[in-house]
Amino acid sequence: MYSSYILERFQRPRFAGGLRGANGTGKAGSEEDGDVIKIYILVDETGLITSAKFKAYGGVCTIVACDIACDMLIGKTLEDALRINNIDILERMGEIPESKEYTSLLVEEAIKNSVEDFYKRKEREERKNQIN
Amino acid sequence: MGRKVYLDNASTTYVSSEVLAEMLPCFNAIYGNSNSLHSFGREASAIVDRARDRIAHAINAAKSNEIYFTSGGTEADNWAIKGIAHAYSNKGKHIITSQIEHHAILDACKQLEEEGYEVTYLPVDKFGLVNIVDLIHSIKKETTLISIMTVNNEVGTIQNIKAIAKIAHDYGVIFHTDAVQALGAVHIDVQDMEIDAMTLSAHKIYGPKGAGCLYLKNGTRIENLIVGGSQERTKRGGTLNVPAIAGFGKAVEVATRDLVINQQKLRSIRDYFLRNVEEKIEFVHLNGHPQQKINGIVNLSFEMVDKESLLMLLDMEGIAVSTGSACTSNSIEPSHVLKAMGVEDVVANGSIRFSFNKNVSRSDIDYVVEVLVNSVSKLRAISALTKAGRK
Protein backbone atom coordinates (compact mmCIF):
# COMPACT_ATOMS: atom_id res chain seq x y z
CA MET A 1 0.00 0.00 0.00
CA TYR A 2 2.82 2.41 0.86
CA SER A 3 6.22 2.83 -0.80
CA SER A 4 9.35 1.99 1.14
CA TYR A 5 10.21 5.72 1.07
CA ILE A 6 6.94 6.62 2.82
CA LEU A 7 7.32 3.83 5.36
CA GLU A 8 10.94 4.70 6.12
CA ARG A 9 10.11 8.37 6.58
CA PHE A 10 7.07 7.48 8.73
CA GLN A 11 9.13 5.25 10.97
CA ARG A 12 11.94 7.74 11.35
CA PRO A 13 10.64 11.26 10.78
CA ARG A 14 13.49 13.77 10.92
CA PHE A 15 11.55 16.82 12.07
CA ALA A 16 8.98 15.47 14.55
CA GLY A 17 8.45 17.25 17.85
CA GLY A 18 8.19 20.76 19.24
CA LEU A 19 10.60 23.60 18.38
CA ARG A 20 12.06 25.67 21.18
CA GLY A 21 11.98 29.38 20.35
CA ALA A 22 9.68 28.95 17.34
CA ASN A 23 8.40 32.33 16.20
CA GLY A 24 5.70 31.04 13.86
CA THR A 25 3.17 28.23 14.36
CA GLY A 26 0.66 27.05 11.79
CA LYS A 27 -2.22 24.71 12.52
CA ALA A 28 -4.51 22.81 10.17
CA GLY A 29 -7.17 20.11 10.44
CA SER A 30 -9.45 19.12 13.30
CA GLU A 31 -9.63 16.30 15.79
CA GLU A 32 -13.13 15.41 14.62
CA ASP A 33 -11.92 14.99 11.03
CA GLY A 34 -9.06 12.76 12.15
CA ASP A 35 -6.03 14.96 11.39
CA VAL A 36 -4.48 17.81 13.33
CA ILE A 37 -1.10 19.19 12.33
CA LYS A 38 1.07 21.94 13.71
CA ILE A 39 4.12 23.30 11.91
CA TYR A 40 6.63 25.34 13.89
CA ILE A 41 9.13 27.62 12.19
CA LEU A 42 12.11 29.57 13.46
CA VAL A 43 12.79 32.67 11.33
CA ASP A 44 15.97 34.74 11.69
CA GLU A 45 16.30 38.55 11.39
CA THR A 46 16.88 38.31 7.63
CA GLY A 47 13.58 36.50 7.09
CA LEU A 48 15.16 33.11 6.51
CA ILE A 49 13.62 29.95 8.03
CA THR A 50 16.48 28.36 9.93
CA SER A 51 14.55 25.52 11.57
CA ALA A 52 11.17 23.79 11.21
CA LYS A 53 9.46 21.03 13.12
CA PHE A 54 5.99 19.52 13.34
CA LYS A 55 3.52 17.75 15.56
CA ALA A 56 0.81 15.64 13.96
CA TYR A 57 -2.19 13.55 14.91
CA GLY A 58 -3.03 11.50 11.86
CA GLY A 59 -2.12 8.61 9.65
CA VAL A 60 1.09 7.62 7.91
CA CYS A 61 0.79 10.16 5.08
CA THR A 62 -0.08 13.00 7.43
CA ILE A 63 3.13 12.44 9.35
CA VAL A 64 5.25 12.02 6.22
CA ALA A 65 3.74 15.08 4.52
CA CYS A 66 4.61 17.17 7.59
CA ASP A 67 8.13 15.80 7.70
CA ILE A 68 8.69 16.58 4.02
CA ALA A 69 7.25 20.07 4.48
CA CYS A 70 9.69 20.85 7.30
CA ASP A 71 12.54 19.61 5.12
CA MET A 72 11.39 21.94 2.34
CA LEU A 73 10.95 24.92 4.66
CA ILE A 74 14.43 24.98 6.12
CA GLY A 75 16.66 27.47 4.30
CA LYS A 76 13.78 29.17 2.53
CA THR A 77 12.74 32.79 2.79
CA LEU A 78 9.21 33.45 4.00
CA GLU A 79 8.20 34.46 0.47
CA ASP A 80 9.50 31.18 -0.92
CA ALA A 81 7.80 29.26 1.89
CA LEU A 82 4.47 30.76 0.85
CA ARG A 83 5.05 29.44 -2.66
CA ILE A 84 5.17 25.80 -1.49
CA ASN A 85 1.93 24.16 -2.56
CA ASN A 86 0.37 20.75 -2.20
CA ILE A 87 1.61 19.62 -5.61
CA ASP A 88 5.23 20.18 -4.51
CA ILE A 89 4.58 18.10 -1.42
CA LEU A 90 2.82 15.34 -3.36
CA GLU A 91 5.73 15.17 -5.81
CA ARG A 92 8.16 14.65 -2.95
CA MET A 93 5.93 12.00 -1.39
CA GLY A 94 5.88 9.91 -4.55
CA GLU A 95 3.12 7.37 -5.03
CA ILE A 96 0.47 7.43 -2.29
CA PRO A 97 -3.17 6.26 -2.24
CA GLU A 98 -5.52 8.84 -3.71
CA SER A 99 -7.52 8.84 -0.49
CA LYS A 100 -4.46 10.23 1.30
CA GLU A 101 -3.66 13.08 -1.08
CA TYR A 102 -5.64 15.52 1.09
CA THR A 103 -2.78 15.43 3.60
CA SER A 104 -0.68 17.58 1.23
CA LEU A 105 -3.41 20.24 1.25
CA LEU A 106 -3.50 20.24 5.03
CA VAL A 107 0.25 20.73 5.13
CA GLU A 108 0.11 23.58 2.61
CA GLU A 109 -2.47 25.27 4.83
CA ALA A 110 -0.34 24.78 7.94
CA ILE A 111 2.73 26.25 6.20
CA LYS A 112 0.76 29.34 5.18
CA ASN A 113 -0.64 29.66 8.68
CA SER A 114 2.84 29.42 10.20
CA VAL A 115 4.15 32.25 8.02
CA GLU A 116 1.06 34.31 8.74
CA ASP A 117 1.53 33.69 12.44
CA PHE A 118 5.14 34.86 12.19
CA TYR A 119 4.07 38.13 10.56
CA LYS A 120 1.32 38.68 13.12
CA ARG A 121 3.70 38.11 16.00
CA LYS A 122 6.25 40.46 14.41
CA GLU A 123 3.61 43.14 13.93
CA ARG A 124 2.48 42.80 17.55
CA GLU A 125 6.07 43.06 18.72
CA GLU A 126 6.74 46.14 16.59
CA ARG A 127 3.58 47.81 17.90
CA LYS A 128 4.61 47.00 21.44
CA ASN A 129 8.05 48.53 20.84
CA GLN A 130 6.49 51.67 19.38
CA ILE A 131 4.27 52.08 22.47
CA ASN A 132 7.27 51.62 24.77
CA MET B 1 14.18 -12.10 10.89
CA GLY B 2 12.48 -10.36 13.81
CA ARG B 3 9.74 -11.72 15.99
CA LYS B 4 6.27 -12.04 14.52
CA VAL B 5 2.95 -12.13 16.38
CA TYR B 6 -0.31 -12.50 14.50
CA LEU B 7 -3.26 -10.91 16.31
CA ASP B 8 -5.65 -10.61 13.38
CA ASN B 9 -7.41 -13.94 13.72
CA ALA B 10 -10.86 -12.40 13.33
CA SER B 11 -9.79 -11.62 9.76
CA THR B 12 -8.55 -15.14 9.23
CA THR B 13 -6.78 -17.86 11.12
CA TYR B 14 -4.10 -20.21 9.80
CA VAL B 15 -5.21 -23.66 8.62
CA SER B 16 -4.58 -26.19 11.37
CA SER B 17 -2.61 -29.34 10.59
CA GLU B 18 -5.63 -31.54 11.35
CA VAL B 19 -7.66 -29.60 8.79
CA LEU B 20 -4.87 -29.54 6.22
CA ALA B 21 -4.45 -33.32 6.51
CA GLU B 22 -8.14 -33.72 5.74
CA MET B 23 -7.86 -31.48 2.68
CA LEU B 24 -4.69 -32.72 1.01
CA PRO B 25 -6.00 -36.00 -0.48
CA CYS B 26 -8.82 -34.02 -2.12
CA PHE B 27 -6.41 -32.21 -4.41
CA ASN B 28 -4.90 -35.16 -6.24
CA ALA B 29 -6.21 -38.45 -4.87
CA ILE B 30 -9.93 -37.83 -4.56
CA TYR B 31 -10.27 -35.30 -7.32
CA GLY B 32 -13.55 -36.17 -9.00
CA ASN B 33 -16.34 -33.66 -9.48
CA SER B 34 -18.74 -34.37 -6.63
CA ASN B 35 -21.64 -33.95 -9.05
CA SER B 36 -20.42 -36.68 -11.43
CA LEU B 37 -22.13 -40.04 -11.46
CA HIS B 38 -19.02 -42.20 -11.81
CA SER B 39 -16.93 -43.63 -8.98
CA PHE B 40 -14.54 -40.66 -8.91
CA GLY B 41 -17.48 -38.33 -8.48
CA ARG B 42 -19.13 -40.54 -5.88
CA GLU B 43 -15.92 -40.62 -3.88
CA ALA B 44 -15.76 -36.81 -3.87
CA SER B 45 -19.44 -36.64 -3.09
CA ALA B 46 -18.89 -38.84 -0.04
CA ILE B 47 -16.29 -36.34 1.21
CA VAL B 48 -18.79 -33.51 0.80
CA ASP B 49 -21.51 -35.52 2.56
CA ARG B 50 -19.19 -36.20 5.46
CA ALA B 51 -18.42 -32.50 5.82
CA ARG B 52 -22.13 -31.71 5.64
CA ASP B 53 -22.85 -34.26 8.38
CA ARG B 54 -20.12 -32.87 10.59
CA ILE B 55 -21.41 -29.31 10.30
CA ALA B 56 -25.04 -30.34 10.78
CA HIS B 57 -24.07 -32.32 13.87
CA ALA B 58 -22.01 -29.44 15.30
CA ILE B 59 -24.89 -26.96 15.12
CA ASN B 60 -27.58 -29.56 15.91
CA ALA B 61 -29.37 -29.16 12.59
CA ALA B 62 -32.28 -31.57 12.28
CA LYS B 63 -30.98 -32.83 8.94
CA SER B 64 -27.68 -32.67 7.07
CA ASN B 65 -29.46 -31.50 3.93
CA GLU B 66 -30.14 -28.20 5.69
CA ILE B 67 -26.48 -27.27 5.04
CA TYR B 68 -25.77 -25.59 1.67
CA PHE B 69 -22.14 -25.00 0.83
CA THR B 70 -21.10 -21.60 -0.51
CA SER B 71 -17.86 -19.82 -1.38
CA GLY B 72 -17.80 -18.25 2.07
CA GLY B 73 -19.63 -16.07 4.55
CA THR B 74 -20.16 -13.16 2.18
CA GLU B 75 -21.96 -15.30 -0.38
CA ALA B 76 -24.06 -16.98 2.30
CA ASP B 77 -25.04 -13.59 3.77
CA ASN B 78 -25.94 -12.22 0.33
CA TRP B 79 -27.91 -15.33 -0.47
CA ALA B 80 -29.82 -15.34 2.80
CA ILE B 81 -30.84 -11.70 2.58
CA LYS B 82 -31.71 -11.51 -1.11
CA GLY B 83 -32.88 -15.10 -1.51
CA ILE B 84 -35.28 -15.09 1.44
CA ALA B 85 -36.51 -11.54 0.76
CA HIS B 86 -37.28 -12.44 -2.84
CA ALA B 87 -38.91 -15.76 -1.96
CA TYR B 88 -41.35 -14.08 0.43
CA SER B 89 -41.89 -10.85 -1.52
CA ASN B 90 -45.56 -11.69 -2.04
CA LYS B 91 -46.03 -11.53 1.74
CA GLY B 92 -44.20 -8.24 2.17
CA LYS B 93 -41.09 -6.25 1.40
CA HIS B 94 -39.80 -5.22 4.80
CA ILE B 95 -36.57 -6.49 6.36
CA ILE B 96 -35.05 -5.77 9.74
CA THR B 97 -31.35 -5.86 10.48
CA SER B 98 -28.95 -3.95 12.70
CA GLN B 99 -26.57 -1.06 12.05
CA ILE B 100 -23.55 -3.11 13.10
CA GLU B 101 -23.84 -6.00 10.66
CA HIS B 102 -21.04 -7.05 8.34
CA HIS B 103 -21.09 -5.22 5.01
CA ALA B 104 -22.13 -8.46 3.31
CA ILE B 105 -25.50 -7.99 5.03
CA LEU B 106 -25.66 -4.20 4.87
CA ASP B 107 -24.76 -3.97 1.19
CA ALA B 108 -27.19 -6.76 0.28
CA CYS B 109 -29.91 -4.81 2.13
CA LYS B 110 -28.94 -1.65 0.24
CA GLN B 111 -29.43 -3.52 -3.05
CA LEU B 112 -32.87 -4.63 -1.90
CA GLU B 113 -33.71 -1.02 -1.04
CA GLU B 114 -32.87 -0.11 -4.63
CA GLU B 115 -35.37 -2.78 -5.69
CA GLY B 116 -38.08 -1.14 -3.60
CA TYR B 117 -37.76 -3.05 -0.34
CA GLU B 118 -37.88 -1.24 2.98
CA VAL B 119 -35.10 -2.01 5.45
CA THR B 120 -34.99 -1.07 9.13
CA TYR B 121 -31.46 -0.79 10.50
CA LEU B 122 -31.85 -1.21 14.25
CA PRO B 123 -29.59 0.92 16.47
CA VAL B 124 -27.50 -0.66 19.20
CA ASP B 125 -26.61 0.50 22.71
CA LYS B 126 -23.12 1.60 23.75
CA PHE B 127 -22.09 -2.04 24.18
CA GLY B 128 -23.29 -3.04 20.72
CA LEU B 129 -26.49 -4.80 21.79
CA VAL B 130 -29.75 -4.64 19.86
CA ASN B 131 -32.64 -3.48 22.01
CA ILE B 132 -35.41 -6.08 22.04
CA VAL B 133 -38.13 -3.45 22.48
CA ASP B 134 -36.84 -1.55 19.43
CA LEU B 135 -36.98 -4.81 17.52
CA ILE B 136 -40.58 -5.50 18.49
CA HIS B 137 -41.63 -1.96 17.60
CA SER B 138 -40.03 -2.20 14.16
CA ILE B 139 -41.90 -5.36 13.10
CA LYS B 140 -44.72 -4.72 10.63
CA LYS B 141 -47.14 -7.00 8.89
CA GLU B 142 -44.98 -6.70 5.75
CA THR B 143 -41.84 -7.87 7.60
CA THR B 144 -40.53 -11.12 6.18
CA LEU B 145 -36.98 -11.37 7.50
CA ILE B 146 -34.97 -10.37 10.56
CA SER B 147 -31.20 -10.73 10.29
CA ILE B 148 -29.04 -10.03 13.35
CA MET B 149 -25.46 -11.23 13.69
CA THR B 150 -24.66 -13.58 16.57
CA VAL B 151 -21.26 -12.04 17.35
CA ASN B 152 -20.00 -8.72 16.06
CA ASN B 153 -16.75 -9.00 14.11
CA GLU B 154 -15.23 -5.73 15.31
CA VAL B 155 -16.00 -5.65 19.02
CA GLY B 156 -17.04 -9.23 19.82
CA THR B 157 -20.38 -8.41 21.47
CA ILE B 158 -22.75 -11.42 21.62
CA GLN B 159 -26.41 -10.70 20.83
CA ASN B 160 -29.35 -12.34 22.62
CA ILE B 161 -30.05 -14.49 19.58
CA LYS B 162 -32.46 -16.92 21.20
CA ALA B 163 -34.69 -14.10 22.41
CA ILE B 164 -34.53 -12.29 19.06
CA ALA B 165 -35.37 -15.46 17.12
CA LYS B 166 -38.30 -16.15 19.43
CA ILE B 167 -39.71 -12.68 18.83
CA ALA B 168 -39.30 -13.13 15.08
CA HIS B 169 -41.31 -16.33 15.24
CA ASP B 170 -43.96 -14.86 17.53
CA TYR B 171 -44.65 -12.45 14.65
CA GLY B 172 -44.30 -15.08 11.93
CA VAL B 173 -41.02 -13.64 10.61
CA ILE B 174 -38.04 -15.67 9.39
CA PHE B 175 -34.85 -15.27 11.37
CA HIS B 176 -31.33 -15.31 9.90
CA THR B 177 -28.08 -14.81 11.77
CA ASP B 178 -24.53 -14.26 10.56
CA ALA B 179 -22.65 -16.54 12.96
CA VAL B 180 -19.26 -16.36 11.25
CA GLN B 181 -17.50 -14.99 14.34
CA ALA B 182 -19.58 -17.08 16.72
CA LEU B 183 -18.58 -20.46 15.37
CA GLY B 184 -16.10 -22.06 17.75
CA ALA B 185 -16.55 -19.21 20.22
CA VAL B 186 -20.08 -19.85 21.51
CA HIS B 187 -22.24 -22.95 21.56
CA ILE B 188 -24.66 -22.94 18.63
CA ASP B 189 -27.79 -25.09 18.60
CA VAL B 190 -30.01 -24.02 15.73
CA GLN B 191 -33.02 -25.95 17.02
CA ASP B 192 -32.82 -24.69 20.57
CA MET B 193 -32.09 -21.14 19.37
CA GLU B 194 -34.90 -21.34 16.78
CA ILE B 195 -32.67 -20.18 13.93
CA ASP B 196 -34.14 -20.50 10.43
CA ALA B 197 -31.06 -19.51 8.47
CA MET B 198 -27.46 -19.07 9.51
CA THR B 199 -24.20 -18.09 7.82
CA LEU B 200 -20.96 -19.89 8.69
CA SER B 201 -17.43 -19.65 7.33
CA ALA B 202 -14.36 -21.89 7.56
CA HIS B 203 -11.43 -19.53 7.67
CA LYS B 204 -12.11 -18.04 11.10
CA ILE B 205 -11.85 -21.46 12.76
CA TYR B 206 -8.55 -22.79 11.38
CA GLY B 207 -10.21 -23.85 8.12
CA PRO B 208 -9.46 -22.76 4.57
CA LYS B 209 -10.58 -19.56 2.85
CA GLY B 210 -13.23 -19.91 0.16
CA ALA B 211 -15.58 -22.22 2.04
CA GLY B 212 -18.72 -21.37 3.95
CA CYS B 213 -22.28 -22.47 4.18
CA LEU B 214 -25.82 -21.38 4.70
CA TYR B 215 -27.83 -23.42 7.18
CA LEU B 216 -31.42 -23.26 5.98
CA LYS B 217 -34.11 -24.96 8.02
CA ASN B 218 -36.17 -27.27 5.85
CA GLY B 219 -39.37 -25.56 4.83
CA THR B 220 -37.77 -22.11 4.62
CA ARG B 221 -38.09 -20.80 1.08
CA ILE B 222 -35.17 -19.16 -0.70
CA GLU B 223 -34.51 -18.02 -4.24
CA ASN B 224 -31.23 -18.96 -5.88
CA LEU B 225 -28.43 -16.45 -5.84
CA ILE B 226 -26.23 -18.45 -8.19
CA VAL B 227 -27.73 -20.49 -10.99
CA GLY B 228 -26.11 -22.76 -13.53
CA GLY B 229 -26.02 -26.21 -12.01
CA SER B 230 -27.97 -28.75 -10.01
CA GLN B 231 -25.55 -28.73 -7.10
CA GLU B 232 -26.75 -28.27 -3.54
CA ARG B 233 -30.21 -29.68 -4.23
CA THR B 234 -30.50 -27.25 -7.19
CA LYS B 235 -30.30 -24.27 -4.83
CA ARG B 236 -26.71 -23.19 -5.51
CA GLY B 237 -25.08 -23.83 -8.85
CA GLY B 238 -21.34 -24.36 -9.26
CA THR B 239 -18.84 -27.19 -8.86
CA LEU B 240 -18.19 -27.72 -5.21
CA ASN B 241 -14.76 -26.86 -3.82
CA VAL B 242 -14.24 -30.34 -2.38
CA PRO B 243 -10.86 -29.77 -0.67
CA ALA B 244 -12.09 -26.59 1.03
CA ILE B 245 -15.38 -28.23 2.03
CA ALA B 246 -13.50 -31.22 3.47
CA GLY B 247 -11.38 -28.79 5.47
CA PHE B 248 -14.43 -26.82 6.54
CA GLY B 249 -16.14 -29.95 7.87
CA LYS B 250 -13.07 -30.95 9.83
CA ALA B 251 -12.53 -27.41 11.13
CA VAL B 252 -16.12 -27.28 12.44
CA GLU B 253 -15.79 -30.67 14.07
CA VAL B 254 -12.53 -29.68 15.80
CA ALA B 255 -13.84 -26.23 16.78
CA THR B 256 -16.86 -27.83 18.45
CA ARG B 257 -14.81 -30.57 20.09
CA ASP B 258 -12.27 -28.08 21.48
CA LEU B 259 -14.62 -25.19 22.17
CA VAL B 260 -14.33 -25.24 25.95
CA ILE B 261 -10.57 -25.68 26.13
CA ASN B 262 -9.94 -23.09 23.39
CA GLN B 263 -12.16 -20.58 25.10
CA GLN B 264 -10.37 -21.10 28.40
CA LYS B 265 -7.04 -20.42 26.68
CA LEU B 266 -8.38 -17.37 24.86
CA ARG B 267 -9.98 -15.94 28.00
CA SER B 268 -6.76 -16.29 29.93
CA ILE B 269 -4.73 -14.61 27.15
CA ARG B 270 -7.32 -11.87 26.63
CA ASP B 271 -7.45 -11.06 30.35
CA TYR B 272 -3.66 -11.06 30.61
CA PHE B 273 -3.42 -8.69 27.63
CA LEU B 274 -6.08 -6.33 28.99
CA ARG B 275 -4.56 -6.26 32.49
CA ASN B 276 -1.19 -5.31 31.06
CA VAL B 277 -2.52 -2.68 28.68
CA GLU B 278 -4.65 -1.06 31.38
CA GLU B 279 -1.69 -1.02 33.75
CA LYS B 280 0.80 0.43 31.28
CA ILE B 281 -1.10 2.74 28.94
CA GLU B 282 -3.38 5.62 29.91
CA PHE B 283 -6.27 7.09 27.93
CA VAL B 284 -7.39 3.72 26.57
CA HIS B 285 -11.03 2.68 26.09
CA LEU B 286 -12.37 -0.85 25.74
CA ASN B 287 -15.07 -0.98 23.06
CA GLY B 288 -17.85 -3.55 23.24
CA HIS B 289 -19.69 -5.29 26.03
CA PRO B 290 -17.70 -5.79 29.25
CA GLN B 291 -19.01 -9.35 29.76
CA GLN B 292 -21.31 -10.43 26.94
CA LYS B 293 -18.54 -10.82 24.37
CA ILE B 294 -16.37 -13.52 22.89
CA ASN B 295 -12.89 -14.08 24.29
CA GLY B 296 -11.00 -13.85 21.02
CA ILE B 297 -11.64 -10.19 20.15
CA VAL B 298 -10.51 -7.07 22.01
CA ASN B 299 -11.21 -3.65 20.52
CA LEU B 300 -9.32 -0.79 22.14
CA SER B 301 -9.26 2.94 21.42
CA PHE B 302 -6.06 4.81 22.14
CA GLU B 303 -6.71 8.52 22.49
CA MET B 304 -4.51 11.07 20.70
CA VAL B 305 -3.27 8.34 18.37
CA ASP B 306 -4.38 7.56 14.82
CA LYS B 307 -5.28 3.91 14.24
CA GLU B 308 -3.45 3.62 10.93
CA SER B 309 -0.23 5.03 12.33
CA LEU B 310 -0.42 2.69 15.30
CA LEU B 311 -1.18 -0.33 13.10
CA MET B 312 1.83 0.46 10.89
CA LEU B 313 4.21 0.92 13.81
CA LEU B 314 3.07 -2.44 15.24
CA ASP B 315 3.46 -4.02 11.80
CA MET B 316 7.01 -2.71 11.57
CA GLU B 317 7.75 -4.72 14.71
CA GLY B 318 6.13 -7.87 13.29
CA ILE B 319 2.75 -7.51 15.02
CA ALA B 320 -0.37 -7.89 12.88
CA VAL B 321 -3.57 -6.25 14.11
CA SER B 322 -6.53 -4.64 12.39
CA THR B 323 -8.24 -1.27 12.42
CA GLY B 324 -11.64 -2.96 12.22
CA SER B 325 -13.08 -5.46 9.83
CA ALA B 326 -10.55 -6.61 7.20
CA CYS B 327 -13.24 -5.98 4.61
CA THR B 328 -13.33 -2.26 5.44
CA SER B 329 -9.86 -1.55 6.84
CA ASN B 330 -8.81 0.40 3.74
CA SER B 331 -11.60 2.83 4.43
CA ILE B 332 -10.72 6.17 5.99
CA GLU B 333 -14.22 6.50 7.43
CA PRO B 334 -14.60 5.68 11.12
CA SER B 335 -15.98 2.19 11.78
CA HIS B 336 -19.75 1.95 11.25
CA VAL B 337 -19.90 -0.37 14.26
CA LEU B 338 -18.26 2.05 16.69
CA LYS B 339 -20.31 4.90 15.25
CA ALA B 340 -23.52 2.94 15.88
CA MET B 341 -22.36 2.28 19.44
CA GLY B 342 -22.07 6.02 19.95
CA VAL B 343 -18.27 6.03 20.24
CA GLU B 344 -17.11 9.56 19.39
CA ASP B 345 -15.17 9.86 16.13
CA VAL B 346 -12.13 11.17 17.98
CA VAL B 347 -12.05 8.00 20.09
CA ALA B 348 -12.96 5.69 17.20
CA ASN B 349 -10.09 7.17 15.15
CA GLY B 350 -7.66 5.46 17.51
CA SER B 351 -9.32 2.04 17.64
CA ILE B 352 -7.49 -1.19 17.02
CA ARG B 353 -8.86 -4.74 16.99
CA PHE B 354 -6.65 -7.39 18.55
CA SER B 355 -7.91 -10.90 17.84
CA PHE B 356 -6.21 -13.92 19.32
CA ASN B 357 -5.80 -17.56 18.39
CA LYS B 358 -5.41 -20.57 20.66
CA ASN B 359 -1.61 -20.61 20.31
CA VAL B 360 -0.86 -17.04 21.38
CA SER B 361 1.39 -17.23 24.45
CA ARG B 362 1.95 -14.94 27.41
CA SER B 363 5.40 -14.26 26.05
CA ASP B 364 3.79 -13.11 22.77
CA ILE B 365 1.54 -10.81 24.76
CA ASP B 366 4.49 -9.43 26.74
CA TYR B 367 6.18 -8.57 23.45
CA VAL B 368 3.02 -7.03 21.98
CA VAL B 369 2.41 -4.89 25.08
CA GLU B 370 6.02 -3.72 25.11
CA VAL B 371 5.82 -2.65 21.45
CA LEU B 372 2.36 -1.17 22.00
CA VAL B 373 3.57 0.94 24.94
CA ASN B 374 6.50 2.25 22.87
CA SER B 375 4.42 2.88 19.75
CA VAL B 376 1.61 4.70 21.57
CA SER B 377 4.15 6.75 23.46
CA LYS B 378 6.06 7.61 20.25
CA LEU B 379 2.87 8.73 18.48
CA ARG B 380 1.65 10.71 21.48
CA ALA B 381 5.02 12.45 21.78
CA ILE B 382 4.61 13.86 18.27
CA SER B 383 0.81 14.18 18.40
CA ALA B 384 -0.68 17.62 17.86
CA LEU B 385 -3.29 16.67 20.49
CA THR B 386 -2.59 17.03 24.17
CA LYS B 387 -3.74 15.31 27.34
CA ALA B 388 -5.22 18.54 28.70
CA GLY B 389 -8.94 18.23 29.34
CA ARG B 390 -9.09 14.47 28.72
CA LYS B 391 -10.51 12.04 31.24
Image (cartoon, coloured by chain):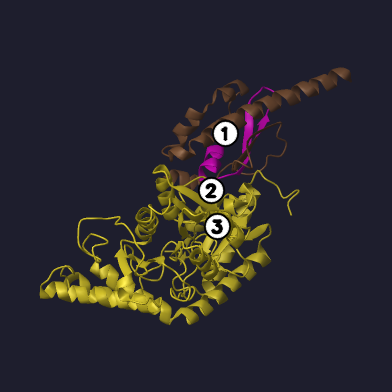
Which picture quadrant has residue B195? bottom left
Cα–Cα span, label 3 and label 2: 22 Å
Of residue B163 and residue B248, the one placed in the foreground of this image is B163
Instruction: Name the residue: 27% across, 62% down.
Output: B235
Q: Amino acid at mark 2?
A: Arg
Provide the letter of the chain coloured brown. Answer: A
Total tally of numbered discs in the picture: 3
Of residue B181 and residue B78, the one placed in the foreground of this image is B78
**Numbered range of the magenta stretch:** A40-68
Q: Within 10 angstroms of label 2, few (less than 14), some, or many (20 or more) residues?
A: few
Cα–Cα span, label 2 and label 1: 19 Å
Q: Secondary structure at mark 2?
A: loop
x%, y% of residue B353? 53, 60
Determine whether, in the image, residue B107 is placed left or right of residue B159.
left
Residue corresponding to mark 2? A12
Q: Earlier in the sequence, mark 2 or mark 1?
A: 2
The correct choice, above or below, for B242 with respect to A112 in the image is below
Residue B352: numbered disc: 3
Chain under callout 3? B
